[in-house]
Every structure is written in C-alpha cells, then in structure tokens.
Image (cartoon, rainbow, N blue to C red):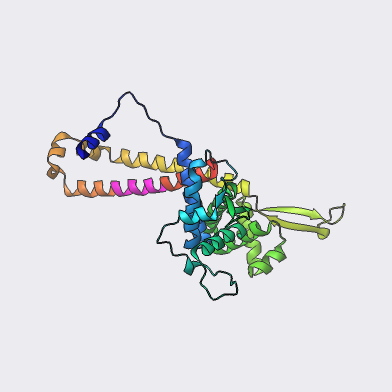
C-alpha cells in the first residue's frame, strides 16, 4: 500500500502548470515580520500569542492592504498555541481576590488585552462576550514595521542620541527644542546639533507657528517633527541606490576573476581539481566569500524595500 502511495506522489502531470502566488508570499512575510516585532517590543509570550492569532487569520487574508483580520476568539487563540508555550512567567496577571493561580485562558486573555492597549495597537477588542473577540490590526502592524525600520536606520547612521530624539518626536508629534531637551535629558547644545544633522538628511523638519499675524521671530514657536512618509521614501531611495551598487560590485568581482572562473569550468579541471594551484584555490575562496557577503547585503536590502514599498 505504501509503495503504491509513493508511486502516486512521484507521478507528475506534465499538462499542469504552476505559478508562484506573490501576494501570499508577501502576506506571510509581512505577518512573520509583525510577529517578530511584537516579540522585540513586548516579550516572547506576546510573540507566541500573536503567532497563534495569525495562524488562525492568515488563510483569510487576501492582500497586504487589508486593514484588519477576521474576528478571532480568545478560546480559538488558546487552541492554536503550542503545548510547550511558557506564558505564565512572561506576564503579571491582575489579582482577582483569590489565591488560585490564573488559568492558561486567563493568561492568554491578558496578553490579548495587552496587545490591544500597547501604543502600536496590534489588536482591537471587538466583542466582550465569552472570553472576548479580537481582530488583528494589520495596518497598524505594517505601520509599526515601517517605523521600526526607519528608527533602526537612524540609529545605525546617526547614533543612539539621534535615535532617541527621533523616537521622542515620533511619539510626541511636534515639540520645541526646550521640550525635546527636557524629555531626552540631553544637553541643549547637543540636541541642537543632532536635530540639525537629522534635518540636513531630511529626516526631521521645522514648523513655524507664529503667535501673531506679523510673524515676528521673537513671537514665533519653532516646532520639530518627523515626516514619517518622507523618511520612508528617502530610505527606500537609498536602498535602491545601495542595491544598484551591490549588483555593480558583483559584476566587477566576477569580471575581475573571469580567467579563473573559465579555468574552473574546464572539463579537465572538473575531472581533476588538482590542476588548480594553491593561489587558484585561495582566489576562488576569496571570490566566494565576497559574493556571499554581497548576496546577504542584497537580501537585507530586498527585505527593507519590500516593507517600505509593498506593505
């Protein structure tokens, strides 16, 4: 019986054509990124709960531009959690006046409510009946992904202090220099320098708010803010430029060692690799390492572009 089943599986109907479902790939990639973002922002317990929620909702999501998922019950989320999920140590459950330990269902509900009240609003509670009904806020999750990416680029390029100032502005929308200094606990001179650096890069902007119609500078508020959509476009353009540079570098590396590559592909060398010298082996190993680095960098840029452009 098993032999017949194996033969049936191995049979290929050559008249059937297949194609890649790019929309589903993008959806699953986006969902995985949101799950990871929840883990980084909250903890591993919240990540496990979010993963269970997506396991239920994923097959009903048709595009990356849907605002919310279908409603999910807390009971159903609990059913889709792995049996080895250790949630109890990841959250403090509100006391109910008894000495009994909270049940697994109560802990899961606490996590779901936590994801509803988090600043990113990953979930929304839509029904109080039973254990509760929830929806995944797909648009909010996508916004959180883009913001996380932009913030990581700011930190990588301009350092931790600039990253802190940038986050303060994103969270508070518009602030003057004194307010930023007070919140960030950074010297005013350094705040001014960092904001100017970010402004020169187009990552923050200044808005003038006059107190009177004459627009006298001494009677004008100067408020800093982050134009997030513009930041996303700037970073995406940088990614495209970096991607072009990587591909150009790939071509240069291959072209510079074309003689070696032709030698490696000769039939006699394939049959007897001993015909390659020690220098040939060293050069080939170096080329493979460089091409591997370039491929990793290209994949990272592809992922960044996908988040900024396709979601």
> In the rendered view, would you say 251 is above or below 158?
above
Question: Is residue 73 at all visible to an observer of this figure?
Answer: yes
- Predominant secondary structure, magenta span: helix
- Which residue lies most toward the bottom here? 99
**35 relative position to 193: left or right:** left
- Quarter holding residue 85: bottom left
**235 relative position to 171: left or right:** left
Q: Nearer the viewer, residue 21 or 76?
A: 76
**92 relative position to 291: left or right:** right
Residue 302: image x %, image y %?
Answer: 45, 44
Query: What residue is at 55 percent from the left and 52 percent from the top?
Result: 73
Look at the image and say whether residue 77 sits in the magenta stretch. no
Q: Nearer the viewer, residue 118 or 287?
A: 118
- Which residue lies most toward the top here? 15
Q: Quadrant of the N terminus?
A: top left
Residue 76: image x %, image y %?
Answer: 50, 53
**3 relative position to 21: left or right:** left
Q: Which residues are magenta?
A: 288-297
Residue 166: image x %, image y %?
Answer: 61, 58
Residue 206: image x %, image y %?
Answer: 71, 53
């Amino acid at each position: 019986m098993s032999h017949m089943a194996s033969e049936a599986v191995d049979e290929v109907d050559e008249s059937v054509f297949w194609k890649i479902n790019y929309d589903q790939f993008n959806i699953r990639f986006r969902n995985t990124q949101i799950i990871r973002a929840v883990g980084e922002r909250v903890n591993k317990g919240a990540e496990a709960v979010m993963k269970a929620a997506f396991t239920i909702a994923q097959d009903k999501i048709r595009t990356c531009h849907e605002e919310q998922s279908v409603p999910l019950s807390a009971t159903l989320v609990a059913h889709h959690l792995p049996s080895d999920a250790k949630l109890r140590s990841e959250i403090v459950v509100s006391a109910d006046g008894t000495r009994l330990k909270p049940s697994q269902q109560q802990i899961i509900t606490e996590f779901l409510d936590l994801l509803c009240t988090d600043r990113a609003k990953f979930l929304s509670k839509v029904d109080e009946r039973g254990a509760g009904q929830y929806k995944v806020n797909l648009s909010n999750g996508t916004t959180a992904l883009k913001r996380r990416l932009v913030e990581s680029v700011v930190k990588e390029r301009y350092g931790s202090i600039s990253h802190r100032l940038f986050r303060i502005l994103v969270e508070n929308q518009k602030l003057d220099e004194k307010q930023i200094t007070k919140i960030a606990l950074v010297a005013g001179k350094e705040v001014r320098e960092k904001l100017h650096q970010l402004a020169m890069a187009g990552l923050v902007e200044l808005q003038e708010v006059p107190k009177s119609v004459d627009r006298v500078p001494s009677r004008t508020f100067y408020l800093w803010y982050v134009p997030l959509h513009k930041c996303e476009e700037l970073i995406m353009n940088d990614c495209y430029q970096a991607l072009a540079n990587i591909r150009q570098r790939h071509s240069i590396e291959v072209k510079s060692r074309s003689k070696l590559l032709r030698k490696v592909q000769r039939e006699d060398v394939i049959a007897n690799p001993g015909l390659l010298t020690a220098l040939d082996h060293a050069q080939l190993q170096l080329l493979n390492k460089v091409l591997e680095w370039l491929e990793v960098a290209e994949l990272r840029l592809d992922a960044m572009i996908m988040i900024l452009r396709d979601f």
